[in-house]
Image (spheres, helix red, strand yellow):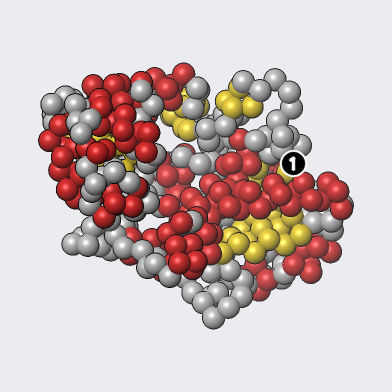
């Protein structure tokens, strides 16, 4: 396999918990060297988060393991002369600096953009925060759930009876991390041409609103305020969750040909001729009635049977799986998405971590080492806690 796209790129990572570490995990998977700078004796809060008390006690909690394999760890106190000297040396030799403090925290420690740029004119400095480095909310604290609520996501998640609901995982943190990784990669490409670094100010709130796509543009462009629709897709019908003999099935027959094929396969070729269901917009208006007709027919077979029948004929359909079931899919296993890595300092113990779904020249991106112990690489980088 040829050299990975970010091989040789050095990242100094001051981030904590999720959005920032998820960003640096993506950069690591693409080949970058990532050095986590952690608070002496304490480290990333995620080291103590997870369902396994023993791992939490060992500062290797499951939340930490999820996005820190393949990185290095040094302990630095940025308020001590020794810690500051080591940090400045690392910044001078780095390509990227990541942080996710509240706006202005790093500047108050003496490292605003002017100071960082003086240390390293080619530095790409990415500050990830809830609201960005400017504006009336810039200093406010923000966790994923706060951003989910403020972005409008929770207002469209659930049914009219259950709204607002939180998405079942830290989606806004993940979006923020992905957008940061994209921004950093773009800045590195730009630096290759110009030779100059830049300051990236990333707002998780704005990134999350951007990621809502059609939900936002329908309002901005057409003045249509989005509403919660539960498991149904507002853009098409039939598109949502349906009932089978043994459980739910997702069907997204968003195109006319797909709808007609669906009706033929379930034994209801009459439905496309019904004026209520003949066209895309009329199907959306009569969604509930159409769903009742489809559910009645779909209850005759299992979800797995319908998945195979419909997908074979080009109708997007699939079961709704649990997380363990999704991880056990042969599709996921065959592409090398999951990797076993050793736990540092834990003898023969291994843990399984995910990649990111990218295959480069036929080889899936994987972490190239275990998650680091706190301060494991202090000596390598001249750091003393």
Residue at the spot of label 1: 9
Q: Which residue is drawn at 69% across and 54% down?
A: 97
SS label for mark 1: loop
Residue 77 % position (x, y)? 63, 59
Q: Residue at x 87, y 52 (%)?
A: 195
Query: Is 365 left or right of 324, judged from the image as shown?
Result: right
Question: Closer to the camera, 247 or 335?
Answer: 247
Q: Quadrant of the image for the N terminus?
A: top right
Report whether residue 234 is seen.
yes
Q: How many marks?
A: 1
Report whether residue 84 is seen.
no
Q: Which residue is drawn at 23% across and 30% down?
A: 269
Question: Closer to the camera, 187 or 162?
Answer: 162
From this view, report whether residue 240 is shown above or below residue 201.
above
Q: In which quarter of the image is residue 116?
A: bottom right
Neighbor class of circle 1 (other Cα within 10 Å; few <14, some 14-19, many 20+) is some
From this view, report whether residue 68 is shown above or below residue 100.
above
Residue 222 % position (x, y)? 45, 67
């Amino acid at each position: 396999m040829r050299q990975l796209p970010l091989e040789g790129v050095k990242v100094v990572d001051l981030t904590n918990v999720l959005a920032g570490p998820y960003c640096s995990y993506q950069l690591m998977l693409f080949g970058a060297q990532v050095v986590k700078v952690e608070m002496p004796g304490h480290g990333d809060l995620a080291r103590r988060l997870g369902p396994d008390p023993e791992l939490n006690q060992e500062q290797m909690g499951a939340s930490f393991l999820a996005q820190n394999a393949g990185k290095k760890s040094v302990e630095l106190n940025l308020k001590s002369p020794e810690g500051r000297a080591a940090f400045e040396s690392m910044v001078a030799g780095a390509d990227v600096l990541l942080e996710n403090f509240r706006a202005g925290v790093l500047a108050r420690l003496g490292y605003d953009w002017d100071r960082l740029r003086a240390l390293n004119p080619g530095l790409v400095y990415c500050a990830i925060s809830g609201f960005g480095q400017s504006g009336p909310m810039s200093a406010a604290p923000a966790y994923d759930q706060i951003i989910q609520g403020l972005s409008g996501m929770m207002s469209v998640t659930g049914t009219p009876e259950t709204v607002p609901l939180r998405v079942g995982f830290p989606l806004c943190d993940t979006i923020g991390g992905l957008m940061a990784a994209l921004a950093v990669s773009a800045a590195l490409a730009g630096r290759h041409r110009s030779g100059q670094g830049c300051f990236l100010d990333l707002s998780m709130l704005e990134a999350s609103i951007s990621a809502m796509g059609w939900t936002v543009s329908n309002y901005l462009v057409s003045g249509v305020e989005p509403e919660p629709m539960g498991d149904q897709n507002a853009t098409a019908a039939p598109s949502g969750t349906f009932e089978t003999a043994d459980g739910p099935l997702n069907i997204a027959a968003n195109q006319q040909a797909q709808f007609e094929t669906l009706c033929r396969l379930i034994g209801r070729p009459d439905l496309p001729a019904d004026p209520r269901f003949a066209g895309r917009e009329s199907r959306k208006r009569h969604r509930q009635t159409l769903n009742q007709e489809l559910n009645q027919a779909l209850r005759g077979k299992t979800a797995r049977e319908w998945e195979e029948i419909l997908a074979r004929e080009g109708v997007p359909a699939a079961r709704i799986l649990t997380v363990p079931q999704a991880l056990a899919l042969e599709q996921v296993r065959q592409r090398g998405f999951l990797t076993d890595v050793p736990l540092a300092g834990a003898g023969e113990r291994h843990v399984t971590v995910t990649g990111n779904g990218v295959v480069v020249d036929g080889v899936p991106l994987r972490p190239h080492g275990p998650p680091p112990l706190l301060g494991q690489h202090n000596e390598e980088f001249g750091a003393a806690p």
